[in-house]
Image (spheres, grey):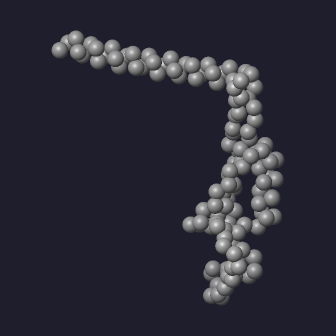
């Protein structure tokens, strides 16, 4: 038995990773800050409250799954929300019909190319 899952993009949110700003450091200032890390950080740090707030917004917009990607070059966590659900019988029928039509169209295009090639070969 096949299970059809429909995944629909909902929205994308980018959260900046600037924990030093929470403690009063800003890049425009001339002040220095020293970050003493006691552990290795793979990507960057983003506030938990910011992530929870973003996830709640995405959930209210009908997202039930997310894709997370941290960009080290510009220190942002990208959160993309998606709605994933089982397809209805009508949606499956429509999908299968379109898939079958694409296969028919592909075969017809291939036949046309072969007929044109055969025609050229006969003309030689």
The quarter holding residue 98 reads top right
Count the labels in the image.
0
The quarter holding residue 47 reads bottom right
Q: Residue at x 74, y 82 (%)?
A: 24
Q: Residue furthest bottom?
A: 31
Horizontal side, residue 60 vs residue 118: left or right: right
Q: Viewer-proximal residue, 58 or 28?
A: 58
Percent across and percent down for residue 37 are: 69, 79
Q: Residue at x 69, y 38 (%)?
A: 7
Percent across and percent down for residue 2 are: 69, 26
Q: Viewer-proximal residue, 110 or 56?
A: 110
Horizontal side, residue 108 vs residue 79: left or right: left
In which quadrant will I find the C terminus?
top left
Q: Viewer-proximal residue, 118 or 39?
A: 39
Where is 41 relative to 7, above or below?
below
Q: Residue at x 65, y 87 (%)?
A: 32
Q: Residue furthest top?
A: 122
Percent across and percent down for residue 5 are: 71, 33
Q: Residue furthest left?
A: 124
The quarter holding residue 1 reads top right
Where is 124 relative to 19, above or below?
above
Percent across and percent down for residue 78 are: 66, 57
């Amino acid at each position: 038995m096949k299970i059809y899952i429909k995944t629909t993009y909902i929205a994308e949110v980018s959260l900046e990773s600037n924990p030093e700003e929470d403690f009063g450091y800003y890049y425009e200032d001339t002040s220095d800050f020293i970050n003493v890390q006691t552990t290795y950080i793979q990507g960057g740090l983003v506030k938990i409250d910011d992530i929870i707030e973003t996830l709640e917004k995405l959930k209210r917009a009908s997202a039930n799954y997310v894709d997370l990607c941290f960009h080290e070059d510009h220190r942002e966590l990208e959160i993309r929300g998606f709605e994933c659900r089982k397809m209805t019988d009508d949606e499956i029928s429509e999908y299968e019909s379109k898939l079958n039509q694409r296969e028919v169209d592909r075969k017809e295009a291939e036949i046309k190319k072969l007929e044109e090639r055969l025609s050229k070969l006969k003309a030689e």
